[in-house]
């Protein structure tokens, strides 16, 4: 028996040394300790051992099983460690590899011009307000002194939602809302930039475009204040040598009304294709707030005066950033937009 045990032990030592992986280790366990395993069968022989040797035999068997288990656990731990190391190696990140290039976006010229205009007017003490794009006839027309039947109310120009509601055709609609919200408080100094809509849709007009409205109401506001303000606006935005010209015009909500031109920044006023040879480019509409508009907004025209102006943001962006075609602003061509990187 001793011989047999010794032989098994030697054999096991060798086999454990030869085992190469977990699979082989498990096979070894089955071969020795499985149902029909070598150790299992040997241990079953206890029934044939003489009674006085049973204890001794039992101890020897336990020792053999323990030795096997110890060797098994040691080998198992070794394979487990190898497995973890191999996995770690496989998952290693090569930090020297080049990364994917992250594409940074750029500010859209439309947002950029709004920010520039806002910064300029805020620096002059104005507030920036928002008005609804879905507007009612009341604020877009009636409170701005458009009589019933005025051509601007025509359904050919305006997107009507129903009898009462429409998409605002001009940011001037904010004027009456601002007056109503302030209830004779003064001064009012606000600008309202935003989207506007008209039923124009051809190569030079888009049915959605941007405008910014300005409104100032106080005691003793005169046309000179309007002229000074708009001159600063034009020069700051388009350059200090920009000349400004005021032409009489008509808008229902201002009197007197004017249109404001700036000297052509492309030719400096000599005349070119951009200014159609005139040397001037139309920039905005403006005027002194009509007494009817003040009254309907809750301001006594005997006590208060004011001025208003409004201009197209798309045109302004074209002039400011030298954009040759208005369609580029809404085309979302990434090559065009990329030119407006924040880097500046
Ligand atoms: N709302 C006018 C338009 O869309 C522009 C305008 C003209 C605004 C004169 C004004 C103004 O505030 O006083 O053409």
Image: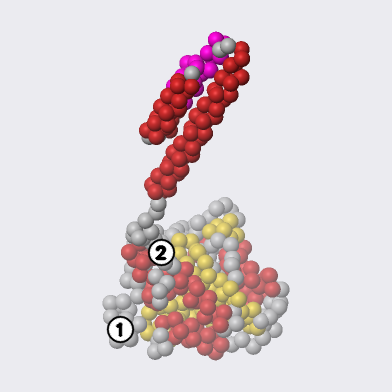
Q: Residues within 10 Å of mark 1 (few under 14, many from 20)?
A: some
- Above or below 115: residue 67: above
Q: Residue at x 53, y 55 (%)?
A: 160
Are the residues flagged by discs 2 and 1 in contact, CB closer than 8 Å? no
Q: Magenta segment, principal secondary structure? A: helix
Q: Nearer the viewer, residue 342 or 195?
A: 342
Helix, strand or loop under label 2:
loop
Q: CA distance from mark 2 to mark 1?
A: 35 Å
315 drawn magenta: no
Q: Residue at x 34, y 66 (%)?
A: 336
Q: Residues within 10 Å of mark 2 (few under 14, many from 20)?
A: few
Residue stretch in magenta: 27-48
Locate residue 25: give its quadrant.
Answer: top left
User: Reading the chain from its start, which is encountered first: label 2 or label 1?
Assistant: 2
Measured as percent of width and height from the top left, residue 117 is found at: 50, 76
Residue 303 showing in the rendered view: yes
Q: Would you say the beta carbon of the disc 2 residue lies within 8 angstroms of ligand 1? A: no
In the displayed orientation, state which residue is furthest to the front.
Answer: 52
Locate residue 131: give its quadrant.
Answer: bottom right
Q: Residue at x 55, y 10 (%)?
A: 48
- Residue 55 is tagged as none
- Residue 267 is tagged as 1
41 drawn magenta: yes
Helix, strand or loop under label 1:
loop
Q: Which residue is mark 2?
A: 104
Residue 254 showing in the rendered view: no
């Amino acid at each position: 028996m001793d011989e047999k045990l010794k032989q098994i032990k030697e054999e096991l030592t060798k086999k454990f040394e030869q085992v190469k992986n977990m699979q082989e280790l498990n096979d070894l366990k089955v071969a020795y300790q499985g149902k029909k395993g070598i150790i299992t069968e040997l241990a079953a022989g206890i029934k044939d051992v003489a009674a006085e040797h049973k204890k001794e035999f039992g101890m020897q068997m336990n020792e053999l099983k323990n030795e096997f288990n110890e060797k098994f656990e040691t080998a198992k731990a070794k394979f487990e460690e190898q497995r973890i190391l191999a996995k770690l190696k496989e998952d290693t990140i090569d930090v020297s590899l080049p990364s994917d290039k992250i594409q940074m976006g750029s500010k859209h010229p439309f947002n950029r011009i709004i920010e520039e205009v806002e910064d300029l007017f805020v620096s002059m003490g104005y507030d920036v307000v928002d008005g609804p794009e879905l507007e009612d006839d009341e604020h877009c027309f009636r409170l701005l002194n458009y009589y019933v039947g005025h051509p601007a109310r025509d359904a050919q120009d305006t997107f009507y939602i129903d009898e009462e509601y429409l998409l605002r055709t001009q940011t001037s609609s904010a004027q009456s809302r601002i007056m109503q919200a302030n209830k004779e408080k003064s001064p009012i100094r606000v600008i309202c930039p935003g989207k506007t809509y008209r039923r124009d849709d051809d190569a030079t007009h888009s049915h959605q475009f941007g405008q910014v409205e300005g409104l100032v109401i106080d005691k003793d506001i005169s046309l000179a204040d309007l002229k000074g303000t708009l001159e600063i606006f034009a020069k700051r935005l388009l350059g200090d040598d920009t000349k400004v010209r005021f032409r009489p015009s008509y808008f229902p909500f201002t009197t007197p009304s004017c249109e404001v031109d700036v000297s052509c920044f492309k030719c400096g006023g000599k005349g070119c294709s951009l200014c159609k040879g005139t040397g001037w480019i139309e920039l905005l509409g403006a005027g002194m707030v009509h007494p009817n508009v003040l009254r309907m907004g809750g301001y006594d025209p005997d006590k208060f005066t004011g001025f208003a102006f409004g201009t197209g943001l798309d045109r302004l962006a074209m002039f400011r950033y030298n954009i040759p075609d208005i369609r580029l602003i809404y085309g979302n061509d990434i090559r065009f937009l990329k030119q407006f990187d924040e880097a500046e």
